[in-house]
Each structure stands twice: as structure tokens, then as C-alpha cells.
Amino acid sequence: MKTRLSAVSIVLLCLAGPAMAQQFVYPAKGQSAEQQKKDEAECYTWAVGQTGFDPAKPQQAAAPAPAPAPAPAPKGGRVRGAAAAATVAAVTDHDTGDAAVAGAVAGGAAQRGQKRQQAAAQQQQAAAQQQAAQQQASSQNSAFNKARAACLEGRGYTIK
């Protein structure tokens, strides 16, 4: 039983190392190394139960909310631009062919600008979601560390 408990505590401590990297445990009441390992493993389990967070288990990243479907880009931006320019040219007695080409170029540029704006908005939304997930993980980790420290302090250890 002791061998099993020690093996479990070593595995837990190795896996949880990054989560507890900032905490140092000192046996203030002369506890043996074996007793300390046992206490740390039990307090780890207790902290997981209290917080619902286990730093040894990778958090399943919440699937990002699907980005809102981009507003459909106006179809035929070039065609509309060309038609509008040709109409203006016809009314003003200018060359409708040259005006249509210029309108098509302007219509295509407007479409590309809208697509860039939509892509930038989606990137900002994804960055905000990632930041929120990181803050939540940090908060959960902090709560876990506080619970673990409280348990260990109750067993006579100093935590720094």
C-alpha cells in the first residue's frame, strides 16, 4: 500500500509540477520525507475535490464559439461598379468602355476591403476568447493552489 501511495504521489507531483511551481513546502513540524509525500498527495486530491480543477489533467479548451457568419459580400461588386460607371459615362457623353473598366476596379476594391474588415473582426474575437480562457485557467489554478496550501498548512507545513 505504501509503495502504491508513493508511486501515485510521485506521478501526481510530476504532472502537477507546472501548476505548483511557485509553491514551496517546508515540513515545519519535522515530518519525514515519506510523510510529506503522503500529505502532499492527499492535499492534492483534496484540493481537486474542493475546486473541481486538476492541474495534472489538461483542460479541454472550450471550443470557441463559432464566429458569426460574415455578412454576405455584395455579389458582383465589379459588375455593379462597371454598370454604374457606364451609366454615368453614357449620361455625360464619355467613353462607356473606359468608365466600365474603372468602375469594375473600384467595385472589386470595395469588396476586398469588406473581406479584410471581416477577417480582422474575426481575429479580434478569437483573441478575446483566448484571453478569457487563459484568465479562467489562471483563476482555477490560483484557487487550486490556495486550497492545496490550506490543506498542507493544516497538517503543519509552511508554504511559500
Image (tube, rainbow, N blue to C red):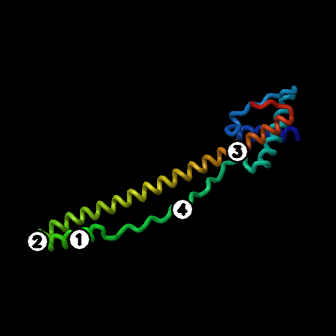
Marks 4 and 3 sit apart, C-alpha to C-alpha, by 27 Å
Marks 1 and 4 sit apart, C-alpha to C-alpha, by 37 Å
Splitting the image into 4 quarters, where does residue 87 fall?
Answer: bottom left
Give SS at disc 3. loop
Q: Which mark is residue 55?
A: 3
Q: Which callout, 4 or 3, points at the residue further toward the start of the chain?
A: 3
At label 4, the amino acid type is: Pro
Give SS at disc 2. loop
Marks 2 and 4 sit apart, C-alpha to C-alpha, by 51 Å
Pointer 2: what residue?
Answer: 93
- Please name the residue shown 84% across and 40% down the image: 5
Tag in front: 4 or 3: 4
Pointer 1: what residue?
Answer: 84
Q: Which callout, 3 or 2, points at the residue further toward the start of the chain?
A: 3
How many other residues sit within 10 Å of disc 1, few (<14), some (14-19) or many (≥20)? some
At label 2, the amino acid type is: Asp
